[in-house]
Amino acid sequence: MKYLITGLGNIGEEYWGTRHNIGFRVVNELAIVAEAPFCEERYGAVARFRIKNAELTALKPNTYMNLSGNAVRYWLQKEALTIEQLLVVVDDLALPFGSLRLKTKGSNGGHNGLRNIEETLGTTAYSRLRFGIGNNFETGKQYDYVLSKFTLEEEEALPERVKLAAEMVRSFCLSGAEITMNQYNHR
């Protein structure tokens, strides 16, 4: 089986290490473990590798967050994949820091990257791995918060949570969404 694993984020050094780029960190972890380098291709950086019998194309879109749907649509078509073979890794303000939730469909929750993917693909029925970034910001400061760096304490906890998120992606590809949700969603 083949999969497109898309980590959402923004390109550019100024965005590295921000809460909004956690999707990039998770797909980076997958590629590092697989020893698969990212190469710049159309609409983003791509790494290809296998996990047992699953073929993965890991994508970090270079379209910026708000136009992520263009990259996702292009790579689904290029790889001849269905919507069931897509998993989007995304930051989520509604979840406490480090919480991980796999869902097979749902609303965009106000996330502009997910909103654009939904508009471009014409559906909300695609899997997403939501990575909690917390919501410790003042009213009206959401934009600044998602583009801020993690605290030192959060940075220290991130490697373990990113590894767990990568483990969930591997489980999704090898065991399916239902088993992965049952096994990981409350860890």
Image (cartoon, helix red, strand yellow):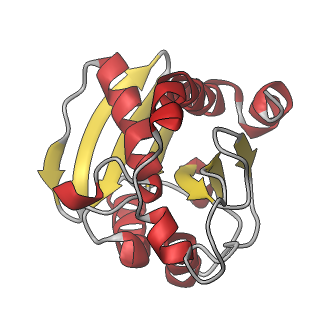
Residue 169, by quadrant, is top right
Q: Tell me, yes or no, if residue 125 can be seen here.
A: yes
Position in image of residue 96 (x %, y %): 72, 47
Of all residues, the one furthest to the left in this rendering is 40
Residue name at image x 15 percent, y 55 percent: 41
Residue found 56% across the figure and 74% down from its top:
142
Left or right side of 13 for 48: right
* Above or below, comparing residue 79 to residue 39 in the picture: below
Q: How many marks?
A: 0
Q: Position of residue 11 (x, y in %)?
A: 24, 61
- Left or right of 27? Residue 10 is left
Image: 112 above or below 62: below
Q: Is residue 101 above or below residue 1?
A: below
Q: Nearer the viewer, residue 113 or 48?
A: 113
Residue 115, located in which quarter of the rendered image? Answer: bottom right
Residue sitting nearer the eye, 108 or 47: 108
Q: Residue at x 66, y 80 (%)?
A: 139
| Spot occupied by residue 58 in the image (x, y as percentages of width and height) | 36, 42
Q: Look at the image and tell me in which quarter the C terminus lies.
A: top right
Residue 6, image x, y percentages: 44, 51
Residue at 28% x, 71% y: name it: 63
Residue 1 visible somewhere in the drawing: no
